[in-house]
Image: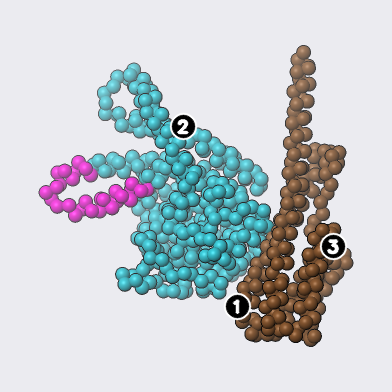
Chain colours: A cyan, B brown
Amino acid sequence: MALASVGTGTHIWNNNIRSFLLLAFYPLIVLAVVWVGFFVAVQGHEWPAAQYWPRTLEFLLGYGWAILLTIACWLMIAYFLNARMTRALCGAREVTRADEPELYHLLETLCIARGVPVPRLSIVETHARNAFASGVDERSFQITVTRGLLQSLPEDEVEAVLAHELAHVLNRDVRLLTICIIFTGMFGFAAQTLSRMLRGFGRRRIHVGTSRRNKGGGQIMLLLYVMLAVLWVAYFMSLIARFAISRVREYSADAGGIELTKKPEAMMRALLRISGHDRIPDTTDEVAMMCVVNTRRSFLGMFRTHPSMQDRVRVIAEMTKTPAPASPLRPVGRGRSFQPPAPVPTRRNRIRIGRHGRSSVPQTVAAPSSVPTAGGVAGSGATSVQAEQLDPHENRR
Amino acid sequence: MYVLIGIAVIALLVLGLFMLLFNRLVALRQRCGKAFHDIDIYLRHRHDLIPQLVEVVKGYAAHEKKVLENVTAARAGAGEAVSASKTERARAEGALGTALVNLLSVAEAYPDLKADASFQRLMGEVAEIEDRISAARRYFNSATAEYNTGREQFPANIIANRFGFEAEHFFELDEAVKRAVQEPPKISFSN
């Protein structure tokens, strides 16, 4: 990427510049996208070449203000509600000091050592082990961890993960990524929601009887066009998301976390214990991008967002002259201090509540097969060009 | 004419640079002061916990008079030292810490006390406060390091020396207190 980082200071500087550029150029990008859409849509019309440009200009001037107004509204909504949106994206629940005193205390101590206000804390009730941070300013910064992480990692490793996420927050990676995903991601959102609706709709269509076949043909073509348009737009938006991704950020956050806790071995152990269990089911690629570990090999089939686990552990071991712990590490079992509440039966509950109200998932996290296969596909969305069936077991090393 | 304008521009730039550096030094110094006083908040919490702890221990181990008196006296000493110099303060807080450790090690010998719910709660709070105190001290040290670096780096050191920005000291204990703290605490199970 053009703006190379030399150290933490320049990394933060880069992130701030990129955030600003992204927000400043986003309206122009959207206008350009809409213009190209217009171009594609009018291909059928037999306009003389000379009339082409004036007409498109007319279109832009006529509807440009509406587009800009929509963007402005969206940015306002995103600014005030981005914390809620990220929670809704993965089914997280905000927790207070009273709900999780030990976890809050860990985070609070780290924040005192850095002299920053404590971000909000939220928890995703899933057996996957992962964490991510989101938000754009002190009011909305939020760190989300999964229940599986709290149950399988001992306290010093949870502290290491929290320190890693806090480092992301302080480096402003989180601000840039949230702007990419939520602020400028309105098309990505729309694309993914629409594609899921269409997939559901398409599946139901198969059961339509033969009497409707004629009508069905035209509608299916329309659906295909819409899906193509959606895919194209989302692909384009992913190019924007690339702007936010650099391997440097993960190494920087690892380093920042270790600097904060002074326990490199705990960080390495945490990374090793998380690997292989990091896929939070039923979330989008964008959420996965923000996580501490992301082994999804495709983001729209293009690239890995995180450096590999071995690389990260090796770099930590070299830089801190600490030997890497032997892997694989078995999960610690329910941590003494973190007791999960009874699973709350909500619609999006990933700890599956059986029909008779009993939890159908085993209570210990001994075997990796306890990662629930909710829906099978770990949320690659319509935008995955190859229909990759992400098997939760495939990434175990 | 142009020479005058050129000189004016350069003068403005120099003034601007001066302002930037000066204000940055001020901000860093204030941060050190704030960090130092933030430590006080947590020390105060610790002071406030002590009477409750003493009461609970008295309920089960009333005859451990010496230890209890030590703790109460140390707390009083620390409370008085609030307005004293930093070294006095550090000494008083160190003494309080030692007295607290003694009290808690005495409490280990009473299983009833250990099982008491309020004692456990207070122990948890003491542990949390100690974590916060050390985190706050770390922050104070990093703020101090940044301020000292800022005032010694090149263009700013001229301004710092000229305008009286003195170097801050890290949270360090002076020699006598260091020796006292580095000795293992004198734990006595007898009265």
In front of the other: label 3 or label 2? 3
Subunit bearing disc 3:
B
Residue B91, x across and y down, in percent: 83, 65
Residue at the image position 73 percent from the left and 54 percent from the top: B35
Subunit bearing disc 1:
B
Q: CA distance from mark 1 to mark 3?
A: 35 Å
Residue A308, x across and y down, in percent: 53, 57
Q: Would you name the residue on which mark 3 appears?
A: B88
- Amino acid type assigned to the residue bearing label 1 in the image: Ala
Name the secondary structure under disc 3: helix
- Amino acid type assigned to the residue bearing label 3 in the image: Glu
Contact check, label 3 and label 2, Cβ < 8 Å: no
Number of other residues with Cα within 10 Å of mark 3, as a class: few under 14, some 14 to 19, many 20 or more: some
Depicted A199 relative to depicted B181: above or below? above
Q: CA distance from mark 1 to mark 2?
A: 63 Å
Depicted A357 relative to depicted B139: above or below? below
Contact check, label 1 and label 2, Cβ < 8 Å: no
Residue A205: within the magenta? yes
Residue B180: within the magenta? no
Residue at the image position 46 percent from the left and 74 percent from the top: A364
Q: Where are the magenta residues, as a range?
A: A192-220
Number of other residues with Cα within 10 Å of mark 1, as a class: few under 14, some 14 to 19, many 20 or more: few
Q: Would you name the residue on which mark 1 appears?
A: B117
